[in-house]
Structure formats: structure tokens, C-alpha cells
Image (cartoon, helix red, strand yellow):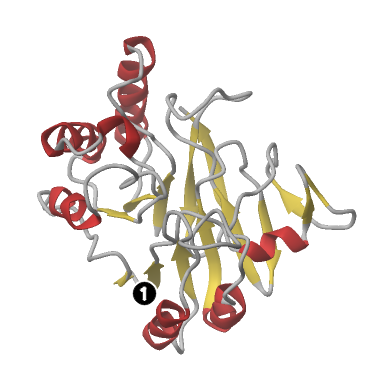
Amino acid sequence: MKIMLIADVHNNPEVEKEKHDPSIEKLKKIIDTVPADLIVFLGDTVYGPAVKKDFALYRKFSREVYDCTKSVPFATVFGNHDDEDSISKDEILSIIAEYPNALTNGRNYVLKIDGETLLFIDSGSYYEGEGSCYDTVKPGIIEWAKGEISGTKAILFQHIIVPDILSLVTGEAFNDGVEYTGEIKESPCPPDINTGELRELSPYLKAAVFGHDHENSFEVELMGVKLIQCAGAGLQSYEYPQPPSVKILDTKTLETRRIPI
């Protein structure tokens, strides 16, 4: 199965027209021209703070992105900006549910397609309390996921990368001796608290896919799991030293192809 990975579109009404329209058109073109069996949106599809509590406006900017999928099946996870200062996650899910080709089934769910087990987790937004900026994946969700994927080798999709990545990097570079592919151009931004998600789920995972860190496109193995980081796909997230891109993941080989858009 071929999965198109789309991270951090950040669609929002505050973006100037010369960025907004080309971004949506480029997304349409890549989906039209590159075959995929499934599209996965890795969060921050809409930049919530720019839309506030206006449901109609939020729906408009969500639909601009999801309309690009046409009839291709798609699934989603939440990013930290999707509901930030904006409408609720349940309201966002109601917009996604308008699409007959949407496979999203809540905030945390599992899909079994073409012999593959695909795990989707809401990595949250911001941590309530001290000790971390970004939210953590709670133990209850980890236990739920273990029960759902036990006995398989699943692929995990979530927005924010697992904290374990920090054992491999120093700032914006991998430590000496770490083998990786792709690029690291900014320091990864996981939660500052590690709830053991990767350690607990690693026996049941063959790969884990992330967005959030717009400039990073590296891939590296950790605890026997291939970590696949996807760079941003929208012109409106922030300035890039390289063009926005998507990745195509072959679920059988776990090989990817990065495509500038």
C-alpha cells in the first residue's frame, strides 16, 4: 500500500493571497498526479489561532484542504494548532465526517487496510501544568493502543514526535555514529516528559510517522521502529530553506519518497 503523508498545511485566513492560493493549488496537483491508496494528514491542517471560534470560517479553510483529496481515502490526526484558541476537536471531527472518503474515526483509532494495521493517536496540544511545553500521550491511551495492535506490526501516525528522539540528537544535529537519512534542520520539539509511549508500543510497531517540526525530514531507527519525520506541506507555516513537501510511504518496504510541492 502507498500512503501519501501530508503534514502541517497550516491553512488559515491570515495568509496573504500569493501564498494561500498557490499552496492549495500545489496540494491539489500533487494529489492528482501522484498515485496513493491513502492520504494521511499529520495535524495542523488548519492554523486554529487565526480562525478563532468562527465555525463557518474554520469549515471553509478545512474544506479547502480536504476537497483536494477528491475520492482518495484519507485519515487524520490532530496537531497542537488545529483546535488552539479555536473550535473544539469534536466540531473539527464533524467537518471531516462530511466526506464519504474520510476514514477518521475519532481522536484515537485503528484502521486495518490491505493487511496493514494503522494506529492513529492524538498527541495533544499543550501540557497542563509544569514540566513540559507540549502535551504528552497519556498512559491510558498507550494501554488502549497496546490492546488494539497487540500481535501485529503496526504503523503509528501522530503529530508530535516521541521524546526518545532526543537521545539521538544534540540541537539541530544527530549525534556521531547515528545512521539516518533525510535532513535535520531544526531541533526536534517533543514533550519534555516521557510517558513511555515508544518503549511500550515498540514491540508492536514497525514504523512511526510524525509532523510538527516543519523543516525536518529525517528517518532513523530507534528501539527497532523506523521513525519517519515529515516536513511541512504548506507555504503558510513558516519560511523554508527548502520547498514544502509530502512523502509517499510504501507500507511493505517502509521506503519513502519525498516530493517537493
Task: Identify whether 152 is placed above or below 115.
Answer: below
Examine the image and state in which quarter residue 69 appears: top left
For image coordinates 77% across by 53% down, the residue present is 169
Q: Residue at x 30, y 17 (%)?
A: 21
Instruction: Residue at the far front: name it.
Output: 129
Is 187 on the left-hand or right-hand side of 146? right
Q: Quadrant of the C terminus?
A: top left
Task: Examine the rendered structure and indicate whether residue 91 appears above or below residue 62.
Answer: below
- Give the image location of residue 223, x and y in percent: 68, 74
Image x and y of residue 230, in percent: 53, 45
Q: Is residue 200 above or below residue 41?
A: below
Residue at 52% over, 81% down: 204
Q: Nearer the viewer, residue 222 or 106?
A: 106
Task: State the residue in front, 134 or 75.
Answer: 134
Q: Give the left or right position of residue 31, taking residue 125 as reference.
A: left
**What amino acid type is highlighted by mark number 1?**
Gly
Q: Secondary structure at mark 1?
A: loop
Where residue 243 sits, quadrant-wise, is top right
Horizontal side of residue 194 vs 177, given as left or right = left
| Residue 46 visible in this rendered orientation of the protein | no
Q: Is residue 257 visible?
A: yes
The residue that label 1 is drawn on is 115
In this view, the residue farthest toward the right is 176
Q: Nearer the viewer, residue 248 or 237?
A: 237
- In the rendered image, the quadrant that contains the N terminus is bottom left
Residue 5: x %, y % from top left:
43, 47
